Image (tube, rainbow, N blue to C red):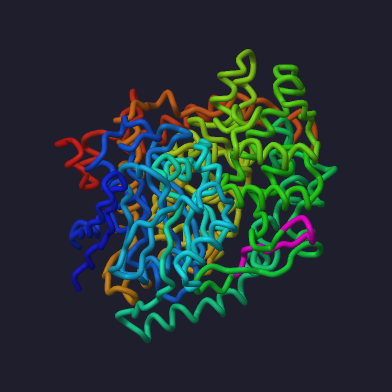
Amino acid sequence: MRFPDGKLLDIDLTNGEIKKKVIPGEVYRLYPGGSALGLYILLNDMDPKVDPLSPDNILVLSVSPLVGFPISGANRMTATTKSPLTNTIGDSQAGGFFPAYLKGNGWDGIIIRGKAQKPVYVYIDGEDVSIKDGSNVWGKVTGEAEETIRQELGIDNIDIAQIGPAGENLVKYACIINMCNRANGRNGTGAVMGSKNLKAIAVKKITRREPVDKEGFKDLAKSVIEKLENNPGVQGMGEHGTDIDLEGFSEEGFLPTKNWTTGWFPEGANNITGITMTNTILKKRDTCYACAVRCKRVVEVPGKVDPLYGGPEYETCAALGSYCGITNLETVALGNQLCNMYGLDTISTGATIAFAMECYEKGLINKSHTDGLELTFGNDEAIPILIEKIARREGIGDLLAEGSYRAAKKIGGQAHKYSISVKGQELPAHMPEMKPTLGVIYAVNPFGADHQSHEHDPVLALPEDSKERINLSHLGVWKGYENIRELDDEKVRFAFNTQCFYSLMDILCLCQFVWGPSWELYGPKDVVELAKVAIGWDTSIHELMLIGERRINMMRYFNFKAGFDKEDDYLPERIFEPFKDGPSKGVALDKEKFEKALTTYYKIAGWDLETGNPTEGTLKKLSLGWLLEK
């Protein structure tokens, strides 16, 4: 069966022109969705050196040929653009229902170019696509904007991806939000929308996809029930959310706390863990389109936290909780709500506030800089005030809206030591001191530190005959480890191989909690089966791994053309400094082993040892020779 063509909306906001673009199937197969498709467009149509907030930057929202089918964990959307936070390629995924509805309307992606003269939003009803005046919704928080757009269109049967005031005010880590609680976070994709005067994209709620092999697809989709019953780990995540392990990380000494000065939070970890959330403020469990796991939190604190804005996940509870020394779950939930209202990435928001708190405690800033706020770790009252100031760029918020890396440069002195970031993006809440391959991937990852770009080290300590290890063997990873903190050549190969597969999952818009090898609901062989029964794509793990590797190299090439090289593959010095207290006292990432592992990674990836960029041979191996010709 011929691979399907990709059908894209191409919208130029400068002149209001809307075109319909087709990516031929033989090309789409090489870049089948997600940021692989986005990068194909950006590298063909845009100079990587453009100012991220100029009209010349392009934003691509894309799904994949596998999106829109009723099966768990297969309905996500990627935003691809040049990041205003890092100046590298920007890449971000979100779930919810918007991706399935976009595909249901017949579109594989949306290309946004230029800048509208005044605020606008886009409405998509199948082939009928229009640009609407967005003046009445500009300035509104996400919940109010959703209600206003529905009233203006006179239809409730729509889903909306939008920015909040943070995106309008060009906060460097602003998000794109759908359902008022699902975020294309990190990288500042919301600021790019704001720079284009694009408030929102509304799509008609349409789902009309039929698999080519209905019986085969039905068997694969229904098998998730049995898989869930036999998987207490995923069951627990569904019951208590991704925050289920927070207290355990603290007990082991690897929960980032007080701006990464310690991995131990004995006074507060139990208060902000997922089990406590379930037992106190959880209102219900929510889900993404057709997913049986139902891991999304919906919380409520009467008079304080509205369930419309969902609930905090692990990264949010850590960033707005332990990073800042906050022990009150209601404060974390309120902070999560404000981030979703204003359209802010919760990781960078919490990490930047934690950075500011350490600068305050070290005397680098004082009340004259903080609008009179006492920015000490554990100050509950400061969190909601700072979030609103950041979103509106008011007072100290204008500085913190730039992210910790740029803020440190403006503050000067020793402030740079307290920005726990890579390529300008703040680290998520998984510690390389415990999981050393994270340090390698944090450093080399093209769009900054990211915890969802490869498999984590602990899976290698599972029995060799476990389902997770068997899944890894399909990716060419066999060696296990009793001590997960080892870092040798085989560990680096494990990191690279699983990075290619995780990259593939992001391209195909598959949820890593459902389709990732370590969660074992579905595994690599099931991805091959899904491709076959859904769209008749007779593929293999080998082809899929190449697709994932191709995307990584396109990203790296984009960064090379934007002026980046191996000097940008670093970690904050704090990662190499031994902890001074708690269960992990004396533990640090070994810098010499890390640097050796970086060199090994470049060799495995086929990147030049001097520059850290893809070689001509690597690009040609991956059918990317056209980049050299350009």
- Residue at point 46%, 50% (across, down): 135
Q: Position of residue 136 (x, y in %)?
A: 50, 53
615 w.r.t. 109: above or below: above
Quadrant in the rendering for residue 217: bottom left
Q: Is residue 410 left or right of residue 29?
A: right
Can residue 465 be seen by looking at this rendering?
no
467 w.r.t. 172: above or below: below
Residue 59 magenta-drawn?
no
Give the quarter of the figure containing the C terminus: top left
Q: Is residue 226 left or right of residue 559?
A: right
Q: Position of residue 593 (x, y in %)?
A: 53, 29
Main SS class of the magenta portion in the image: loop
Which residues, given as a range, are shown in magenta?
294-305
Q: Position of residue 109 (x, y in %)?
A: 33, 58
- Residue at point 49%, 56% (across, down): 94
482 w.r.t. 379: above or below: below
